[in-house]
Amino acid sequence: MSLRAEIIAIGTELLLGEIVNTNASHIARGLASLGINTYHQQVVGDNPARVKQAFEEAYLHADLVITSGGLGPTEDDLSKEMGAEYFGVSMYLDEKARDHIRNYMTLRGRKIPDNNWKQAYLPEGCIPLYNDNGTAPGFILEKDRKILIMLPGPPSEIVPMFDEQVLPYLRSKSAEVMVSRTLHICGMGESAVEEKLHDEMLIMQNPTLAPYAKEGIVDLRITAKAADEETCSRMIAPVESHIRDIFGNLIFGTDADTLPRVVISLLQERGLHLAVAEAALGGKITDKLVSEKGASRVLKGSLIAYANDAKTGLLGVRPETLEAFGAVSEETAREMARGAASAFSAEIALAETGIAEATDSEKPGGMMCFSVYAFGKTWSKTAYYSRRRNSNREMASSAALGFLREVLIADSFPEKNSF
Amino acid sequence: MSLRAEIIAIGTELLLGEIVNTNASHIARGLASLGINTYHQQVVGDNPARVKQAFEEAYLHADLVITSGGLGPTEDDLSKEMGAEYFGVSMYLDEKARDHIRNYMTLRGRKIPDNNWKQAYLPEGCIPLYNDNGTAPGFILEKDRKILIMLPGPPSEIVPMFDEQVLPYLRSKSAEVMVSRTLHICGMGESAVEEKLHDEMLIMQNPTLAPYAKEGIVDLRITAKAADEETCSRMIAPVESHIRDIFGNLIFGTDADTLPRVVISLLQERGLHLAVAEAALGGKITDKLVSEKGASRVLKGSLIAYANDAKTGLLGVRPETLEAFGAVSEETAREMARGAASAFSAEIALAETGIAEATDSEKPGGMMCFSVYAFGKTWSKTAYYSRRRNSNREMASSAALGFLREVLIADSFPEKNSF
């Protein structure tokens, strides 16, 4: 069965631009992962007539319609009723949905407003989708080769309901599966990555290869479509191996790996504790590390030496280094790294000193120097960014972590048994 | 002229869920700010037939259609041509658009691929919208009481083009204006804020009052619609004054004010330099400050004492304090603040010590203690967060800055001439 899907988001706040339609992209991504094609999306307000019209337009081209939102408890929320009407079925009180609502509210010590019971009514003949994260159940309705799936609007409710209940249902409807493998690259810009790929790779049909760039990281996603996962994996393997030949060590991880998590693992494997010294990045490197649960195992702490006197006073950067090379120089970065390692009694330290964006200073805006210190040795590197302040800071914080990884896996890094 | 608008986003990557449709929400917000109603949004792929069909559907209900995307340089990008076809006009080479493309590419030292010139063709009779941030111009086409506005897809191109060129054009078409005023509140949760508002305030029609919560900040937006801005402002004033009576000092700013910017201004006015000490927030407080341009005027630096020995060694927290009260306690926070002020020779310091989420520790996950030190005095506060690690960290970093502001404007804070 090859389904054609359409996504309808229901909500006046979407039409007013008050919220971004992340539900549609979540559903779309899920459908794409199953190889179900979507050719059209709509957004309509909480208005019965317009919701009904949206259904009519959608089923002209699609046989699977998935909606988000419009399942609220108020009298005006009639989207569910419009779905039932379109399919010519009536509504019934679903006892289990009613129990779910009661439990949900009772657990939170809330009184149940009368109109909440309205949410327990569902179209006859549907598969109910109970909601552990809110009061509105969703449902799946199949009739005359058409499928309607209606889901609640809040992302905290729709995401688990879609992932845990809708995707398995749709998977059971599909003859084909899709498998994706993502390789993460740090240390090369998007256009440079694309240039290294052969033209024919970017126009491959199955598997496909797609690059995505975000905050200094380029992802290459390989996606194969076949009868089963094993065949998909067999199709992906040679493409992955070819990409690994091209980019080698620039690939820092796959799929759910993140750069900070990879750095934390490398430090942990080597039994190293890290200190960080930041300047223009103002805590962004440390924040990325601390965002990961494992950070406490390796991170001693950080010193953000925003003012120059903090660089000399707390990190022991020599005034003559600042004088001769400037605050934004690899020489200063090396002394900051050395100073941070010593201040936090850490075996290894990562330092950054830079200018977030163009100022009156003689150094160009977006110039960032990084250094790593470990066991008496230092490594350093300079990079340039040409975007705005916070975009430069975002990219440079990835680059700093990428540089630390580069040093940790380099041949020049001392062997574990040497220290 | 009362326009009815429809937004069509063109892009296969939207249908695949690879990107989120932030363009639609940006455009929708802009239209709402002018009082132009939008009843429907669509998303279609880069496919001429489907783009044309989307136009046909849209103009059944709307007289203003705004598209984003589909203006790329490749042969397949035919959205512009479909727009011209729908309006029955032909395409012409716009010399100025061609010059823009040439300058844009030359400035960046790039060779101009032949197909880029295709982007300089526009529908006859249109108002061209030149693009300073990319190669694809947009345009406005008016005919037979219908308006078509086609804009490029990348947010860095469409946002300035929409704000700087499209909004002024639409404003000139509208008989009414809308004016919004946003009050920012820190230190009270969204539901508590809503409870304090009288029910009738939340159902007012003109002006309207809408609350939005994000990362520990609650915004209250008052929006009035009238013939001119002055009338709008007169309608907004009593509502604002009423809200100020209710929330008083919890309101830290209006409109474009941000909490870090307000804190930076307060410090600057008082001639104070700030040091920060963080633990579980791992740089997030400092990052928020450094994200603002004025940070260098007041921020000395930060110490992120992630490990306990950094709290004692570098911040001078006494081991007996850690022993008696634990790392996550107001007592430890007070000593961290005092230590940070001393380490950075700053007049004032803000400290945080907390647990980002539940662990085996005896202290509850999401417990965060803040302290401010200045001129020999300390202030402190404890807050609890029940979300996930990084959501707690995000909210607590706003709360920490909010606490610093609270102390700075408190009666108990030393007068400027007293120090």
Image (cartoon, coloured by chain):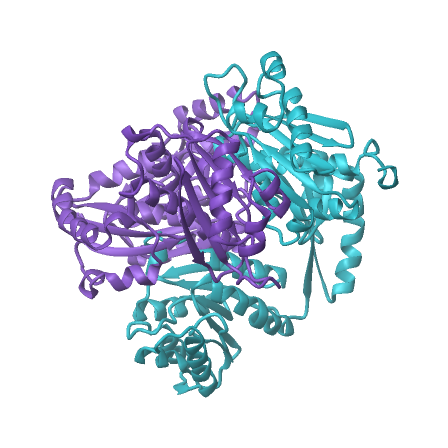
Chain colours: A purple, B cyan
Residue drawn at x 38%, y 43% is: A404
- Image height check: is B9 above or below A218? below
For residue A183, above or below residue B415: below
Q: Is residue B58 above or below residue A61?
A: below
Q: Is residue B50 left or right of residue B290?
A: left
Name the residue nearer the viewer: B98 or B151.
Answer: B98
Q: Residue at x 47, y 39 (%)?
A: A338
Decide if residue B310 is on the left or right side of residue B377: left
How far across and down, in percent of the image, does residue B374 sit?
Answer: 75, 33
Tell me if I can see residue B241 in this picture: yes
Q: Residue at x 74, y 66 (%)?
A: B228
Residue furthest out toward the top: B324
Q: From the top left corner, tell me how far across and down residue B303 is, in percent.
A: 58, 35
Q: Nearer the viewer, residue B397 or B55?
A: B397
Task: Please tell me in which quadrant of the rendered image residue A263 appears.
Answer: top left
How many badges with numbers are in the image?
A: 0
Quadrant where the C terminus of chain A sits is top left
Q: Position of residue A350 (x, y in %)?
A: 44, 41
